[in-house]
């Protein structure tokens, strides 16, 4: 379980409860967030970008759980070199 830096990007509605659910996922897994950016996307939805150091397995679990949040349309992650 080697820690790497990952960026998770999600598209969805701009609602405070979604922001709360995303941050709660990281808190529950005890993963420190390096940065969290919320911005408006071109189609009127919101773009959530979270950068954190963790293992591949942990980030895959978080992405899977984020996909279950109703008002999130898509979630993807990438490793940062």
Image: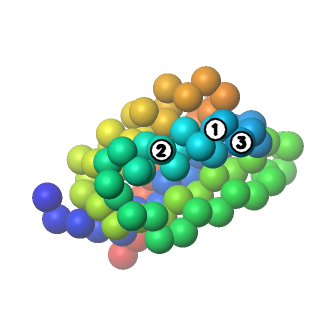
Disc 2 secondary structure class: helix
Q: Are marks 2 and 3 in contact (CB under 8 Å)?
A: no
At x 49%, y 54%, the residue is: 8
User: How many C-alpha atoms fall within 10 Å of the one at disc 1: few (<14), some, or many (≥20)?
Assistant: some
Indicate the position of residue 66 as horizontal and vertical percent values: 49, 36
Q: Residue furthest bottom?
A: 81
Q: Quadrant of the C terminus?
A: bottom left
Q: Can residue 50 be seen in the rendering of this structure?
A: yes
Mark 1 or 2, nearer chain start? 1
Q: Quadrant of residue 71?
A: top right
Q: Viewed as shown, does residue 78 lie left or right of 75?
A: left
Nearer to the camera, 81 or 16: 16
Tag 3, which secondary structure? helix
Q: Nearer the viewer, mark 1 or mark 2?
A: 2
70 with respect to 67 (left or right): right
Against 78, residue 73 (above or below) is: above
In this rendering, the answer to whether 4 lies above or below 71 is below
61 left or right of 36 in image: left
Quadrant of the image for the N terminus?
bottom left
Q: Give the percent coordinates (x, y) of residue 56.
A: 26, 53
- The residue indicated by pointer 2 is 24
Work out how far the residue at label 2 is from the one at label 3, CA to CA, in angstroms: 12 Å
- Find residue 16 and name its label: 3
Name the residue tied to disc 1: 18
Q: Residue at x 69, y 51 (%)?
A: 47
* N-terminal label among 2 and 3: 3
> Distance between the Cα atoms at labels 1 and 3?
5 Å
Distance, label 1 to label 2, CA atoms, is: 10 Å
What residue do we see at 47% from left, 71% from top? 34
- Tags 1 and 3 touching, CB below 8 Å: yes
């Amino acid at each position: 379980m080697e820690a790497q830096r990952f960026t998770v990007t999600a598209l969805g509605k701009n609602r405070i409860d979604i922001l709360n659910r995303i941050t709660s996922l990281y808190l529950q897994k005890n993963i420190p967030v390096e940065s969290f950016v919320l911005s408006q996307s071109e189609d009127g939805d919101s773009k959530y970008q979270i950068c954190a150091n963790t293992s591949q397995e942990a980030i895959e679990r978080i992405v899977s759980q984020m996909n279950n949040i109703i008002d999130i349309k898509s979630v993807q992650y990438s490793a940062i070199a």
